[in-house]
Image (tube, helix red, strand yellow):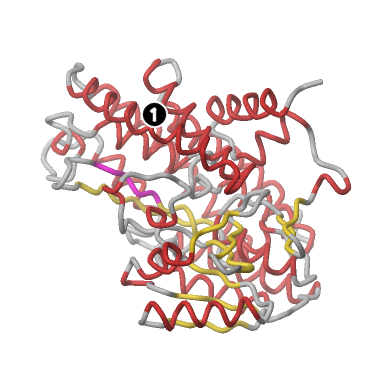
Amino acid sequence: MTSKKQLKARIRARMAKTGESYTTARHHVVGPAVGAAATAADGGWRFSGGRHPSSAAIAAVLLNQGAVVSEPLVFLAGGGIGAGYILWEFKHDGARHVTLGFRNQWQYHDRWMAKTLGRLGVPYEEHRTSGVRAASRRLAAELDAGRPCVVLPDRYHLGYWHLPASLDGHGGHPVVAYRRDADGVFLDDRGQAPIHIPQERFDAARARVGSYGNVLHVLGEAEPDEATLAGAAREGLRDCAEHLSAASDSFSLPAWRKWARLLTDTRNAKAWPKVFADRQGLADALLSVWEGAEPVGMDGGNLRDLFADALDEAATLLERPALEELAGRFREIHALWHDLAETALPAEVPEFARIRELTAAIKESVMADGTAGDPAAARASRELWGARAAANDSLAAAGDPAPLFAALGTRLGAVHEAERAAVARLAELTA
């Protein structure tokens, strides 16, 4: 019989090799869970897993209120996929990091929550409390009343991802706070086990990022009927087509074309040959591309597969079989993103292979074991950040990265063309 330790090792190995999420990798290793084994719980709270933080948080709260709405359908109600690219350069430590936006309005948590919940017919309250103590009291009151809350804390201060201090204040993703005790708050972050955060640390994490500090969404009870879900799907599809047909080269499909050009441009100050002329921080940038595009990362990956699943559901709800064909196209686009991520951080390079393994180990520990997996996650993190620093030094002493940048640009150009054609078809189907 396979031991738990052997099972975890096999899941981690698959995550590192394929870039898959914990849920998908586990499914491939052990098959789908059945019956009682399909749902882990903490008291009255049921863990439902999930792929993307925003959509998974809403789906989890609705499930625990008795309304079963799939995560793909929640994701579609919010407008489905998006596009965005930012290259950050940090002078304090020489780090370079790539932020990729794959969800509709990925840069606006509150706007996305409002339109998603509105389309699904879910009543909600949004609170923004400026003071740390007042925000803590508000959350405590909601949890004591049995109302789980969607919150947006800073990842570094939460602690369970074991990030370095250089990432203090870099933000985070939505999680569900579902109960508390005398010492802290219990979170659901798409995993299968509770994550317990000491109260003082949790309060600091919620308050850290000023643009959305202490934001809290309390979802009222709702049970969307088929007509409501069909309407949400219809509006989400139109929103997606309109949003990705826009001309913005920061927050719509032209962002991919702009990034592709910057990979080989030699004049623009933000072009990769300029930014990485000293080759400093190159491994971090490549890793952030891999983490951003693949589901093994903290944000859920490029989300084109999640959108494809949503299109399949919408095809049935709206009686539009053509959406199933389009779903197949977006699964092909998901594979194009996987190819780009593999080019950025190929497993054939031993240094990169180890970084991928450690990244997967942290994610698996958090998803599978929650707080109980914290010691393993901490050990993997210590080795990971040492390996990242070594890889940065190694690439700084390596040869000309121009061929790599050209290869990434070619693949990104293919992604842009494929998504442009797919979105044009979506616009036709929703006109």
Quarter of the rendering containing residue 368:
top right
The residue sitting at 69% across, 77% down in the picture is 146
The magenta region covers 96-100
Q: Secondary structure at mark 1?
A: helix
Task: Answer with left or right where residue 241 lies relative to residue 7.
Answer: left
- Residue most toward the front? 182
Quarter of the rendering containing residue 34:
top right
Dominant secondary structure of the magenta stretch? strand
Amino acid type assigned to the residue bearing label 1 in the image: Glu
Categorize mark 1 by other alpha carbons within 10 Å: few (<14), some (14-19), many (20+).
Answer: some
Q: Which quadrant is home to the C terminus? A: bottom right
Q: Position of residue 37 (x, y in %)?
A: 83, 44
The residue sitting at 60% across, 82% down in the picture is 124
The residue sitting at 67% across, 75% down in the picture is 120
Quarter of the rendering containing residue 285:
top left
- Please say if 343 is above or below 196: above
Q: Nearer the viewer, residue 142 or 290?
A: 142
Would you say residue 431 is visible in this rendering? no
Q: Which quadrant is home to the N terminus? A: top right
The residue sitting at 17% across, 42% down in the picture is 93
Magenta-span inclusion, residue 185: no
Q: How many marks?
A: 1
Q: Position of residue 97 (x, y in %)?
A: 29, 44
Q: Which residue is mark 1?
A: 383
- Please say if 215 is above or below 49: below
Task: Answer with left or right where residue 158 lies relative to residue 238.
Answer: left
Q: Position of residue 298 (x, y in %)?
A: 48, 47
Would you say residue 155 is visible in this rendering? yes
Magenta-span inclusion, residue 97: yes
Q: Nearer the viewer, residue 278 or 236?
A: 278
Q: Position of residue 13 (x, y in %)?
A: 58, 24
